[in-house]
Image (spheres, rainbow, N blue to C red):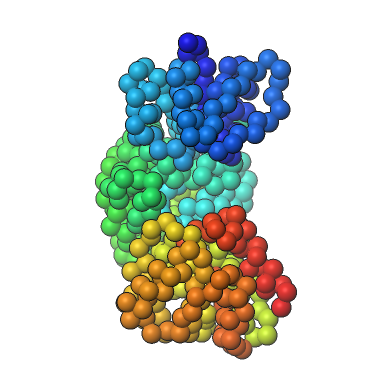
Amino acid sequence: MNHSAIGILGFGVEGKSTLRYLIRNGISNIIVMDKAEVTLPEVPEKINIRVFSGENYKEGLKECKEVIRSAGIYPLDRELLKFQMNGGVLKSQAEIFFESVPREKIIGVTGTLGKGSTVSIIKHILDSANEPSVIGGNFGVPMLDLLEDSSEKTYILELSSFQLMTLGVSPKIGVVLKVSSEHLDWHQSVEEYRDAKANLVRYQKNSDCCIFMEDAKPTVEIVKNSAGQKFSCGKNKNSVAIIENEKLSIGNLSLKLEECKIKGAYQLENMAAAALATLSLGIDIHTIFDSLKSYESLPLRMEFRGEKNGIEFYNDSYATRPDATLAAVKSMKKPFALILGGSEKNADFTELFNELKFTNNLKQISFIGQTSERMFKQAKALELEIPMEIFSDLKSAFEHSLSIGNGGAILLSPACASFGLFKNYKHRGEVFNKLVEDL
């Protein structure tokens, strides 16, 4: 049996990026393993690729000495543990990236909420200061693709619990946003999920920088693992970045949300974290605050899609968790109709519905998707007395929501993933945008 091959476990976007990395690095004997059917890209003739797919795709492990798993593959899987006990080496893209790039060049961002916005705000600030940087990881470009260009730059990485779970090194600057519980269909427990997140800062040195949201207990617990200097963001007067009354204050400088292009009060937390991260790189606070004013939100994150017939439309399709929807709801000023629901991730909606009971400007809820029945029943059980209805698709929910009328708003913020009705959250967001345009 030939044990000289390097395996790629999982052949989605990340797996394909791993294949490109191996080929660039002169590896010619490669095994690709994926439960789904595998379509290989064209590769140079000298490259020998064997594919294991279908139910027994992990049979390919027997042929490998080293395997690079995609982030979504659970590393404590029984067959993977057996592979390692027999002398096999299991790695992730994150581990290879951290071996290849000095940790001083990396800003790592994790949390349950706001990672994508925070990394893009950090990039926007660094662009304004003419500091070369690039975003990658869970958001944007797979990490190993970033290694194609070796020019001097700061790497801004969005890191999920999947990517952090087996990481044994921390970046010089670690940002821990609000952490709740998530991905419990993948992680064995809330503790395991949070423990994975802690790897972002667990291996920091005294001279490193740990930026965190102090208003979230799990986040505070996570950053206790860091030996780095700690910089807090929150409502507390003793926070380094203070967020209150829709303004952000650092030192004696303040920035009001109304001075910014971005919508949603919750974005102040992401701006605070990004400001402290760039401040620790030596960027001037005036430059930081100036650039925050010009930052525009990412598509499908509380994105204002205009006003028609006196109704405002907000596309927050990226909100695939209850706490993301909660943040969006809290930033709504006008009377509004909410569209909720999607595919099942076994999330707990109790906190969301309890908050919605006291959201006086919420006038109606339309449920869609696989979760609609469960959400409707739970909302009723928690005595939510807002008019609620279940719809078979987004179009009918949207049309019903138009009854909010002149002076109101419609918010798509589903609190669930999109599979079933849509390919992904982007597809869901595009369908919503088209419905607005067709008005």
Horizontal relation, residue 88 to residue 436: left or right: left
Considering depth in this image, is 250 or 89 the residue closer to the camera? 89
Query: Which residue occupies the extreme bottom position in the image?
Result: 406
Give the number of marks: 0
The image position of residue 202, as x and y in percent, is 32, 38
Q: Report the residue at 54% width, 74% height from top.
A: 391
- Kindly indicate the quadrant of the structure image that contains residue 166: top left
Residue 379 showing in the rendered view:
yes
Q: For the C terminus, give its image quadrant.
A: bottom right
Query: Which residue occupies the extreme front position in the image?
Result: 55
- Kindly indicate the quadrant of the structure image that contains residue 250: bottom left
Compared with 15, 252 (above or below) is below
Residue 179 showing in the rendered view:
no
Horizontal relation, residue 100 to residue 167: left or right: right
The image position of residue 348, as x and y in percent, is 35, 63
Considering depth in this image, is 321 or 172 the residue closer to the camera? 321
The image position of residue 406, as x and y in percent, is 61, 89
Considering depth in this image, is 227 or 333 the residue closer to the camera? 333
Q: Report the residue at 57% width, 80% height from top.
A: 401
Q: Report the residue at 61% width, 63% height from top.
A: 429
Compared with 322, 208 (above or below) is above
Considering depth in this image, is 131 or 202 the residue closer to the camera? 202
The image position of residue 78, as x and y in percent, is 34, 31
Q: Report the residue at 63% width, 68% height from top.
A: 432
Query: Which residue occupies the extreme top position in the image?
Result: 1
Horizontal relation, residue 82 to residue 106: left or right: left
